Every structure is written in structure tokens, then in C-alpha cells.
Image: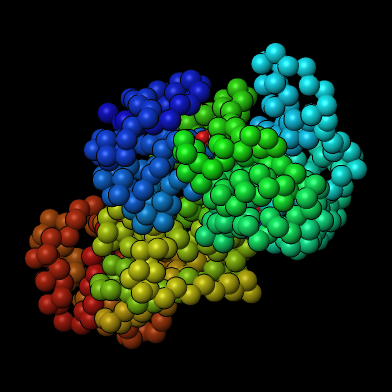
Amino acid sequence: MTKVLVSDPIDQAGIDILSQVAQVDLRTGLPPEQLREIIGDYDALMIRSGTTVTADIIEAADKLRIIGRAGVGVDNVDVPAATKRGVLVVNSPEGNTIAAAEHALALMLSLSRHVPHAHASTMAGGWDRKTYVGNELYKKKLGVVGLGKIGSHVARVATAMGMELLAYDPFVSPERAQQMQVKLLPLAELFAEADYITLHLPRTPDTENLVNAALLRTMKPTARLVNCARGGIVDEAALAEAVEQGVIAGAALDVYAKEPLAADSPLRTVRERLVLTPHLGASTTEAQENVAIDVAEQIRDVLLGLPARSAVNIPGLNAEVMEQLKPHLQLAETLGQLVSQLAGGAISELEVRLQGEFASHPTQPLVVAALKGMLSTALGDSINYVNASLEAKDRGIHVLEVKDAASRDYAGGSLQLSSRSSKGNHSVTGAVFADGELRVTSIDEFPVNVTPSRHMLFTRHRDMPGIIGQIGSVLGEHNVNIASMQVGRRIVRGDAVMVLSLDDPIPPSLLACVHAINGIQEAHPVTL
Ligand SMILES: NC(=O)C1=CN([C@@H]2O[C@H](COP(=O)(O)OP(=O)(O)OC[C@H]3O[C@@H](n4cnc5c(N)ncnc54)[C@H](O)[C@@H]3O)[C@@H](O)[C@H]2O)C=CC1
Ligand SMILES: O=C(O)C(=O)COP(=O)(O)O
């Protein structure tokens, strides 16, 4: 029975989808040791930000195929460890964009008009209209750090509210910024100029403690900071001090370096001008339904052997690409299996050559498919689209990608894999025909036209009378039935290759007899 563990609260719509294909166990709030103990039973894990998936947990996850993050940030998952183990990580990149953006705007407005403090004072019996005089956002400068999906929505709404938009995002082009009516500035200038600063970037080693005491001191004393992105980007102790001492006018946080926020955090002692929420950015009914459905559908699909649309650790290979390139990926994988079995030893270099029309396809997915096929000979099922590139790199395999659009051999182009190993060099070429059928079109530069089949035998021999008959006899003696046979040669009585498609596997004793035939130079059994 396929089993899915849901270790954080998710919307029922997600559970319903998962239940179509698996037994779903909802166990929230598990301590790490307990999660480690039980994870070995599960094929899939669905989480939000409450579960931290460490390398240790992934190590214990013997059956795990996919980790689904019902939200955006995957900083609570050791993605490199998952990749190494071939575990797919997926998320919901857009399901909670609006919720997070609106929460950042809510925090900005709350801060400006002292909503939480005025509310608390009123509830306590007060009627204080003097202390809580605020500021307008209209005509103020808003600095958006990280102009991605959430940052852009905040920018759009803030523009509509009459704010002037500044942004810092090293990966956004000036054209895009201009289109959004946003002025791109270096980080230091943005901090010095803005009246409000809102953070919408991921937490990475580069962004950790980005907003520290020194940067806070460069802000205007009237400026306010909002962090609805990730804890750890802001130095919390420095921020508490800056707000307390009036270095800045206020701050609002939804996310913290360590969650839940520690009872003794210095942030909890700041009484005024600081608004804290417990990671509520994505907590709307709408967003929770969106992300639960988005991620549960991906888990369901992957468990059914289909591709996921938002894979974090196989860049460039989403469901759309997989669907479009299905036969081409299959060809690359098959040629990878073929070339590794012809090589018969550790391959040190693989050249992936996209010829003719093939050169119009994205290279990366085809290279990954070729590597998966190539490595599966030695590594079996443990190799997949997630870890193929990494495994190849770890094994020191040098991968070369060549696009040769000018080559004209087949209408749809062709794909050639050439391997270099201690035992020699081999190359195989294949094409996808109009009906979607795969063909091997050359082996070691000898032209052939072979449909790949489960059991095959490839020989390299001298083109001379009698050799084919002898091979046929040997196969017959071993009760191995030949489905088809092809010979490729470049010159008469020179070197030739023979490809036999067989109905049965090749026993080792048969291979020894084939090798013993006079004129046979190489014989390679291949299983696809
Ligand atoms: N509080 C909450 O509940 C939620 C928080 N988030 C967080 O919000 C953040 C943004 O999410 P999205 O907009 O969906 O992501 P996104 O990927 O669309 O945008 C992130 C932007 O940050 C930029 N960026 C990366 N490194 C940067 C750097 N060093 N300096 C400046 N900009 C940099 C990227 O170029 C990109 O444009 C993420 O950290 C995510 O985890 C997302 C949803 C809910
Ligand atoms: O999607 C994100 O990145 C979030 O931070 C939302 O976190 P949550 O799913 O509410 O625990």
C-alpha cells in the first residue's frame, strides 16, 4: 500500500486528493526523532513550514519518492540531501502569493496606524486618540527588497495607493522594473531613501543577516521595516534595539530565525512600534486550499509515475516539458542505456550531440535523461531524473553538450551519445520518427535502423561469409529466438556491426560461444 505522511496541518482538499492513491496519515507536531523513526514507511511526505526535513531524516527515508511543500519556501528541507537520494522536492510557487503580499500590506498599514496597540489600549478600557496618531502611505517611498511574485504584487498595490516604488533585486532587469514603474537601486541607497521597506526574498547563505545593525542605522529615523519573507534575513536582536531606541520608527515581522519565536526573544520585550504575527503570511482559507490542492496533485501524479509541474530539484524538467519531449527523453534514456552497456566499464566522458531539428529542443532535460539511462545500468532504480546529474558529477563523468543544428540526417533530427571509457570509445545515434517510434540509426558510426527492444546483442566483426550463420546457430543451440537482425557496414569485407533483437535474455555461456567465433571482435549483450 502506498503511504503518504502529512506532518503539518493542510487543507482537507489536499488530503482528499492524496487519498485517491494512497493511505494518508496525518501526524502533526512530530518531534524530529519520531519523524526519523517512522519516515521509512512512507512513499511521500507533505509538509508546511512546521516540519524541518534534515539530511538525517532523508537518510532514514528508504521508500521516500517525493517531499511536497504546501507553500513556497523550501529552506526547511535539505534539498541537496534529497537530490542526492533521488527524492523529488516540489512546492506551490504561486498558491499563496496574494496571501503573503496582502499580509505584508496589512503589516505596513498596522504599523502606520498603530492598529494592534490602539486595539489593545481600547480593549483595556482606554480612549487614547493622541498617542496613536499615524502616518499615511500616500506619496511615501516604499523599498521592495526581492521583486519576485510576492514583491511584485505588493509593488502593484502600493503603486495604486499612491506610493513611490523603489526596489532592490539583482536578478530583475531594468526593462522589467521600468514596466512596473519601479526604480531599481543598490541595497544601501534603497535603505537610505525609503520610508517603508518590505522584504520579499528567500533566505539563503547570501541573505542571512542581510539586515543587520549597520544597515538599520542607515535607515531614516522615520522609516519602518516589514519582514514577511523569512526569518534569519533580519538580525532580530539588532532590530529590537533599533526600534526600542528610535533608530527607526517601527517594524513588523511575520517570520523569525527560529520558529516558534522563543519566549525570551528580545523582540517580545519591545512594547511599542513593533508588530509581530506568528508566521501567518500564507494563512488564508484561499491560499491554504490553493497550496494543498497544488501540492497534493503533484504528489498524486508522481506516485502514479507522472511528472510534477513544480519540481524544485530538477530544473527545466516540468510536466509541460516532459509531455512535449516524451519520446525524445525516452530516446535519450535508451541511448544512454545502450552506450553504457557497449562501454562495459566506467565511462569518464559523455558527449551529448543534438543534431538537426533536435538542436531546437532544450538541452538540459535530454542530457539528464541520457545520464539517467547511462547510470541506470550500474545503479538500477536508485537513479532518476532528480539525482542523475549529481551522480554523474560525483563520479567525475565529464559531460559535453553539443548543438549541431546544421546537421541534416532525419526530418526530426537525431541525438548522438559518444562515450569514452578505459575500455574504448563508443557512439550511438537515434531518432524519433514521425509516428513517435524510436530508432537506433547508427552504432560506432555504422549505419543501422533498429527499433530498440528489451534483449539485444551487438557484435563488431569482420564482414566475411559465414559469420552471420554461425551466430544464428549458436543462438539456436542456446534456445534464444531471434526477432530481427541488422548488419551495418561501411565497406565490403571491412569491419561491420550486427544488431540482433532477441525474444530471450542472453545466458553467459552463449556469450562465450559468440566470442569464440572466428572474426568476432566484440559482443555486447544489452538489456533495455
Ligand atoms: N510569510 C509567509 O507565510 C510566506 C513567506 N514567503 C516567502 O516570501 C519570499 C518570496 O516569495 P516569492 O515572491 O514567492 O518568491 P520569488 O522567487 O517569486 O521571488 C523572490 C525574489 O527574490 C529575489 N532575490 C533573490 N536573492 C536576492 C537577494 N540577495 N537580494 C535581493 N533579491 C533577491 C529573486 O530575484 C526573486 O525575484 C520567500 O522567502 C518565501 O519563502 C512566501 C509565502 C508565504
Ligand atoms: O510558503 C511559504 O514560504 C510560507 O512561509 C508559508 O508557510 P506555512 O505553509 O504557512 O507554514
Tell whether 475 sits left or right of 4: left
**Residue 289 position in % (x across, y down):** 57, 25
In the depicted structure, whether residue 305 falls above or below residue 518: above
The structure's colour scheme is rainbow
**Residue 306 position in % (x across, y down):** 45, 40
Along the viewing direction, whichever of 163 and 81 lies nearer the viewer: 163
Tell whether 509 sits left or right of 175: left
* Residue appearing at x 44%, y 73% in the figure: 399
In the depicted structure, whether residue 323 falls above or below residue 169: above
Query: Which image quadrant is residue 517 in?
Result: bottom left
Along the viewing direction, whichever of 112 and 440 lies nearer the viewer: 112
Tell whether 43 sits left or right of 359: left
Can residue 236 be seen?
yes
Can residue 49 be seen?
no
**Residue 286 position in % (x across, y down):** 63, 24
How many marks the image carries: the answer is 0
Query: Which image quadrant is residue 276 in?
Result: top right
